[in-house]
Amino acid sequence: ETGVTQTPRHLVMGMTNKKSLKCEQHLGHNAMYWYKQSAKKPLELMFVYSLEERVENNSVPSRFSPECPNSSHLFLHLHTLQPEDSALYLCASSQEKGAYTQYFGPGTRLTVL
Amino acid sequence: AQSVAQPEDQVNVAEGNPLTVKCTYSVSGNPYLFWYVQYPNRGLQFLLKYITGDNLVKGSYGFEAEFNKSQTSFHLKKPSALVSDSALYFCAVRDMKTGGFKTIFGAGTRLFVKA
């Protein structure tokens, strides 16, 4: 698990705040992912980047804005969120697309007041 | 459409007994199937995967899974459960039809192992 790190681990923000989640992978992988995990719901894939290019945007509201400056770093910029956006946000990486295993970070627990 | 179903929200088993966590899938083409485990306040950890070959796949922590094509199932098993196996288990399938980046996860099954 130490191969993928996420900061902060916990975040509380108001609906008018702007904040960013950070993910870093030390595994030399080419693909990175953002997932949303809400209670009693399946993991929701939000975004996928491959070699710093976004290859999947799973109908995510524009108040979530991803950024991938290089293959090791992934950000999720948050702006004017809603209380229903409160969830655990998980970052993952994999060597490439296809049959490769994904490695997950510990997540950021986000609470929107 | 590709999908994964975990029919049980929760499985309870006594320590030392065998455990099974069920998963069925629906894919077009060859399935790439995974099991992940999530401990409290942690991210998901890879347990095992089936790509091709032997239908019985062995993974981490003594877990194994059996791929059954006719029943479209990929159940997770362990011969003797430990209290430390208590966690949330996710079955997943890789969606190769949309480029191979998308993994579809089941809703998860919470396993409780009682001492």
Image (tube, coloured by chain):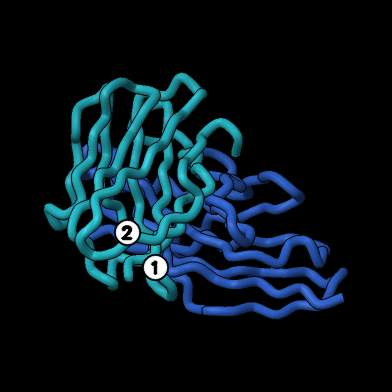
Q: Chain of mark 1?
A: A
Letter of the blue chain: B
Mark 1, residue position: A38
Chain coloured cyan here: A
Q: Nearer the viewer, residue A70 or A51?
A: A70
Horizontal placement of B2 versus B94: left or right? Answer: left
Looking at the picture, how far across and down is residue B100, in whole percent? 29, 38
Tell me the SS state at disc 2. Answer: strand
Host chain of mark 2: A
Q: Amino acid at mark 1?
A: Ser
Q: Secondary structure at mark 1?
A: loop
Res A106 label: none
In front: label 1 or label 2: 1
Q: How many marks?
A: 2
Amino acid type, callout 2:
Glu
Distance of label 1 from label 2 (alpha carbons): 8 Å
Looking at this view, is A61 or A19 the one in front? A19
Residue at image point 19% right, 34% down? A54
Q: Quadrant of residue A88?
A: bottom left
From the image, tell me which residue sits under label 2: A44
- Within 10 Å of disc 1 (Cα), the crowding (few <14, some 14-19, many 20+) is some
Residue at point 30% right, 52% down? A45
Would you say residue B25 is visible in this rendering?
no
**B51 relative to A63, above or below:** above
Q: Name the residue rendered at 64%, 78% in the picture.
A: B11
Q: Residue at x 73, y 62 (%)?
A: B85
Name the N-terminal-most of marks 1 and 2: 1
